[in-house]
């Protein structure tokens, strides 16, 4: 009798351990992703920046791969990891639409954190001078066209010439999103050409 109690308890513990978990809640199992852009090919010439396109389950609209150490960003906002960052606004790709991160080969995703920074562009250099800015991250859910939630995050250069990125951390409002729009909404002088640099985006994707 005693031994069958013990084995029943062991079965319950084993079953609990086998339950898939997403974050801290019960739900479908997700895939954790870290977008560093370091495994993408960057073309050093300004006019030939390559689009990030579809990468690690998501479509990164209006973002190009930019490699540090070329075209003047040996000084500026430094990548959080590796040599590459994703950048918006340093070429005319800005005209092709706002920066938007959309579930592409997955159904939805939890946006957890991202590193970002702003820099002023000049004709000679790409995103070379770190610049204070405010960036709005707007979440969309359930295929609905109106925004679900918006939060502003600030970047203040840690150094006037050579700055680290700032980490934005997102709360539960960014869980189960199908799209996040990213836009520079303040902090920069009107009319200046501002590049928005993004690196090490942490998220969890869901296939269904
Ligand atoms: C974000 O900042 C912009 C510009 O300052 C402001 O218009 C907007 O209301 C802010 N949004 C939120 C959610 O704080």
Image (cartoon, helix red, strand yellow):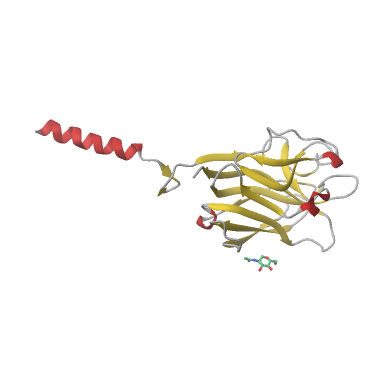
Residue 140 image offset from top left, x and y in percent: 58, 58
Q: Is residue 59 above or below residue 155?
A: above
Q: Position of residue 24 (x, y in %)?
A: 42, 48
Name the quadrant where ligand 1 sits: bottom right
Question: How many labels sit on residues?
Answer: 0
Residue 13, picture quadrant: top left
Observer able to see residue 178: yes
Residue 130 can be seen in this image: no
User: Which residue does the image show at 53% across and 43% down from the upper left?
Assistant: 205
**Which residue is located at x 41 percent, y 47 percent?**
27
Is 84 drawn above or below residue 90 in the view shown?
above
In this orientation, which residue lies closer to the viewer: 4 or 168? Answer: 4
Residue ranking furthest to the left: 1
Work out which quarter of the rendered image holds the N terminus and state it.
Answer: top left
* Residue 50 point in image, percent of width and height: 77, 39
Give the image location of residue 56, x and y in percent.
61, 39
Give me the residue at 77% from left, 38% from top: 68
122, 107: nearer the viewer = 107
């Amino acid at each position: 009798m005693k031994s069958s109690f013990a084995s029943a308890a062991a079965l319950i513990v084993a079953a609990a351990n086998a339950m898939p978990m997403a974050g801290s809640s019960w739900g479908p199992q997700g895939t954790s992703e870290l977008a560093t852009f370091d495994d993408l090919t960057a073309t050093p010439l300004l006019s030939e920046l390559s689009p990030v396109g579809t990468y690690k389950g998501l479509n990164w609209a209006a973002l190009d791969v930019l490699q540090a150490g070329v075209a003047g960003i040996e000084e500026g906002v430094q990548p959080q990891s590796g040599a590459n960052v994703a950048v918006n606004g340093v070429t005319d790709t800005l005209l092709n639409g706002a920066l938007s991160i959309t579930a592409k080969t997955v159904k939805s995703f939890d946006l957890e954190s991202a590193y970002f920074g702003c820099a002023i562009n000049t004709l000679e250099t790409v995103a070379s001078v770190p610049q204070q800015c405010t960036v709005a991250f707007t979440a969309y859910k359930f295929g609905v066209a109106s925004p679900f939630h918006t939060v502003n995050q600030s970047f203040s250069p840690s150094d006037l010439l050579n700055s680290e990125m700032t980490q934005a951390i997102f709360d539960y409002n960014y869980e189960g999103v199908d799209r996040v729009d990213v836009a520079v909404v303040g902090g920069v002088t009107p009319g200046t050409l501002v590049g928005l640099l993004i690196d090490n985006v942490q998220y969890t994707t869901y296939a269904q």
